[in-house]
């Protein structure tokens, strides 16, 4: 069984500052990991995915995440926050890349301070 | 443009009434999914279908039903047995070995 823990339901950063959103996972098999972003009243958009090819994954909008097996973590970062980054972010895990059992974390709402 | 269309965007249900949420995709994806989203709880899987005429229960299937008569369509019915139906419902689809793509959701409220 897989599970995901996102530390911090709300994160606030100043515009131009580093964004760090935390995700820890639990999986009985080598995991596939995803970060999705959700803007208000919209669906989820894929930011990036980890599929065991490389531990540092680059995604859209300047985001990246690093898979650390020893820490069971997949934290999302962006060097410089932009106002348009304000949204809710979800980390998710599955046992295979297209697998039906996509387990989501509870989400982190990111606020950007002007 | 290819994508997933959910309708309606907002839906209201009276007590004891069944309602059906529509999900249509033109991405030629084999698999389709329904999730429920509640504040602070993330997304939870209701039902999924990997092929036409076949579907499986997810983690919170009680009070819901689905059908998959066509590859493009995966409607979700919220029955009167679902005692707390107020939520944001998201439909997704995927090809084999590819991440899931999401629609823009339907917000269901109780009158």
Image (cartoon, helix red, strand yellow):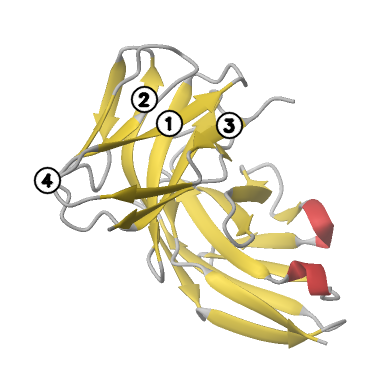
Question: In the rendered view, would you say B97 is above or below A67?
Answer: above
N-term mark: 4 or 1: 1
Q: The disc numbered 4 marks a residue on which chain? A: B
- List the residue tagged with mark 3: B4
Structural crowding at the residue carrying mark 1, measured as other residues with C-alpha within 10 Å and reported as few (<14), some (14–19) or many (≥20): some
Residue A106, picture quadrant: bottom left
Is A85 placed left or right of A40 in the picture?
Answer: right
- Label 4 sits on a secondary structure element that is loop
- List the residue tagged with mark 1: B22
Of circles 3 and 2, which is in front? 3
- Label 3 sits on a secondary structure element that is strand
Q: CA distance from mark 1 to mark 2?
A: 15 Å
Which residue shows up at 56% across the image and 24% down it? Answer: B25
N-term mark: 3 or 2: 3
Q: The disc numbered 1 marks a residue on which chain? A: B
- List the residue tagged with mark 2: B49
* Residue nearest the viewer, comparing A21 with B1: B1
Q: CA distance from mark 3 to mark 2?
A: 15 Å
Query: Is residue A109 visible in the rendered structure shown here?
Result: yes
Is B82 placed left or right of A81 in the picture?
Answer: left
Q: Position of residue A102 (x, y in %)?
A: 43, 45
N-term mark: 4 or 2: 2
């Amino acid at each position: 069984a897989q599970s995901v823990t996102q530390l911090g339901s709300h994160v606030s950063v100043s515009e131009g500052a580093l964004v760090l959103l935390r995700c820890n996972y639990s999986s009985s098999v080598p995991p596939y990991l995803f970060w999705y972003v959700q803007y208000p009243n919209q669906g989820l958009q894929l930011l990036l995915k980890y599929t065991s090819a490389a531990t540092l994954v680059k995604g859209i909008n300047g985001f990246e995440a690093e898979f650390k097996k020893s820490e069971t973590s997949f934290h999302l970062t962006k060097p410089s926050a932009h106002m348009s980054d304000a949204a809710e972010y979800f980390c998710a895990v599955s046992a295979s890349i297209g697998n039906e059992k996509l387990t989501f974390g509870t989400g982190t709402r990111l606020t950007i301070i002007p | 443009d290819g994508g997933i269309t959910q309708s309606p965007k907002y839906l209201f249900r009276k007590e004891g009434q069944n309602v059906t949420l529509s999900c249509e995709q033109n991405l030629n994806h084999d698999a389709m999914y329904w999730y429920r989203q509640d504040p602070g709880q993330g997304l939870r899987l209701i039902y999924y279908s990997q092929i036409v005429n076949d579907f499986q229960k997810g983690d919170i299937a009680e009070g819901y039903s689905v059908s998959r008569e066509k590859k493009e369509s995966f409607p979700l019915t919220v029955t009167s047995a679902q005692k707390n139906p107020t939520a944001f419902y998201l439909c997704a689809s995927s090809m084999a070995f590819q991440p899931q793509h999401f629609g823009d959701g339907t917000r269901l409220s109780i009158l």
